[in-house]
Image: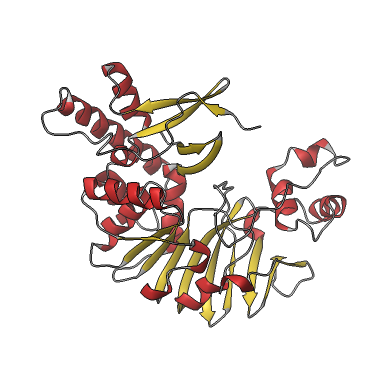
């Protein structure tokens, strides 16, 4: 049974909820707190070198006010979640909300019966993903998973409001609140309500596709809507894979070095399989992030005992030694080289075209 929220309001944000209106008592002080916290967050991410390959993203994170995208969020506590709210009657609670909005941490933003439906991702992970997406001026970008709208705002800051950025989510209440947050922050990407696994064909083709939700397979619809030479960056098997699109139905790429855990995509992509049982696996493997990644990547195709033997034999390979190839109706994961000797078929996603 999932943890229950201590505050059960998980629906619409309400009219302008959490947006600081002119004349609100303490508004200027709260905005100053938010600005200071935002600058500290940028310095923290900057110190890790996240933007070395594309420093323009530093400007986006310094400019886009994350607190406007999380008028309330949930923090895990013993027994469930506690809501932090930007319009709390307690000034100290409002300040905690503003400072917490700029923690380098994911923020749970929407719950239903204890289940996490939507969140705002960890900013440093978002920075890494946006740099790895390799966006250039004039690119058309599709984001799968609108969430709060914050990531779409970062993309819109980078690319402008000329219709180059499209974001899609299945839940109307999520897209409606994302539009409201984006309007409050002054950004106007195209926000679409629909199944992200099917993309947004009416606005294709895209130069870049980025997903902020986990899927059990690579939707062929994304490849069909991405230009040859384009790039798709998506969570997969507790990692992030960057696929270079080579043509219709053809893409290939490696995983980034980092682990990544995202809310599953709802809609036509299908449910994520249950985690594999690791009984009998030595503690060294059960405690290893790189081994658990191999098990997740080969789930249903490689027995955990076989996976452990391979993992040991190959020197505990990190994520970046793995990749994915998509060719027509076939897709497979691999270690080191697409042609083997270690390759495992992935679930089909032909229904998502």
Q: Which x, y percent locates residue 12?
A: 36, 40
Q: Which x, y percent locates residue 176?
A: 34, 50
**Above or below: residue 61 compared with residue 325:** above
**Above or below: residue 342 compared with residue 90:** below
Q: Which x, y percent locates residue 125?
A: 47, 47
Picture quadrant where residue 53 is located: bottom left
In the picture as drawn, the residue positioned furthest to the left comes out as 23
* Residue 273 located left or right of residue 11: right
Instruction: Identify the colour scheme used.
Output: secondary structure
**Above or below: residue 103 compared with residue 343:** above
At 39% from the left edge and 41% from the top edge, which residue is drawn? 45
In the picture as drawn, the residue positioned furthest to the bottom comes out as 248
Picture quadrant where residue 42 is located: top left
Q: Nearer the viewer, residue 34 or 25?
A: 25
Q: Nearer the viewer, residue 44 or 19?
A: 19
Q: Which x, y percent locates residue 254?
A: 60, 64
**Above or below: residue 225 compared with residue 300:** below
Name the quadrant of the C terminus. Answer: bottom right
Q: Is residue 268 visible?
A: yes
Q: Is residue 55 visible?
A: no
Name the quadrant of the N terminus. Answer: top right
At 41% from the left edge and 50% from the top edge, which residue is drawn? 127
């Amino acid at each position: 049974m999932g943890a229950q929220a201590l505050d059960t309001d998980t629906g619409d944000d309400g009219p302008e909820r959490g947006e600081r209106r002119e004349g609100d008592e303490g508004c200027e002080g709260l905005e100053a707190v938010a600005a200071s916290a935002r600058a500290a967050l940028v310095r923290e991410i900057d110190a890790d070198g996240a933007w070395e390959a594309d420093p323009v993203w530093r400007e986006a994170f310094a400019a886009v006010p994350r607190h406007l995208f999380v008028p309330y969020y949930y923090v895990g506590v013993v027994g469930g979640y506690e809501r932090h709210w930007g319009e709390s009657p307690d000034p100290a609670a409002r300040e905690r909300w503003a400072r917490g909005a700029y923690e380098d941490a994911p923020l749970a933003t929407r719950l239903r019966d204890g289940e996490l439906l939507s969140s705002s991702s960890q900013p440093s992970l978002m920075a890494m993903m946006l740099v790895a997406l390799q966006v250039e001026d004039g690119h058309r970008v599709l984001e799968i998973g609108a969430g709060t709208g914050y990531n779409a705002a970062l993309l819109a800051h980078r690319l402008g409001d000329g219709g180059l950025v499209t974001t899609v989510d299945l839940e109307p209440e999520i897209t409606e609140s994302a539009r409201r947050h984006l309007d409050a922050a002054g950004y106007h990407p195209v926000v679409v309500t629909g199944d992200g696994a099917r993309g947004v064909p009416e606005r294709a083709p895209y130069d870049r596709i980025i997903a902020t939700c986990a899927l059990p397979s690579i939707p062929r619809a994304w490849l069909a809507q991405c230009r040859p030479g384009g790039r798709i960056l998506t969570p997969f098997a507790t990692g992030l894979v960057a696929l270079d699109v080579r043509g219709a139905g053809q893409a290939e790429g490696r995983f980034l070095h980092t682990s990544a855990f995202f809310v599953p995509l709802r809609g036509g992509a299908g449910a994520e399989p249950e985690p594999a049982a690791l009984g009998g696996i030595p503690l060294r493997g059960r405690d290893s992030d790189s081994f658990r990644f191999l098990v997740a990547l080969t789930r249903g195709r490689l027995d955990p005992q076989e996976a452990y033997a391979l993992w040991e034999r190959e020197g505990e390979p990190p994520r970046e030694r793995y990749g994915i190839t998509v060719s027509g109706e076939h897709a497979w994961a691999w270690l080191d080289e697409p042609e083997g000797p270690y390759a495992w078929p992935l679930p089909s996603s032909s229904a998502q075209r």
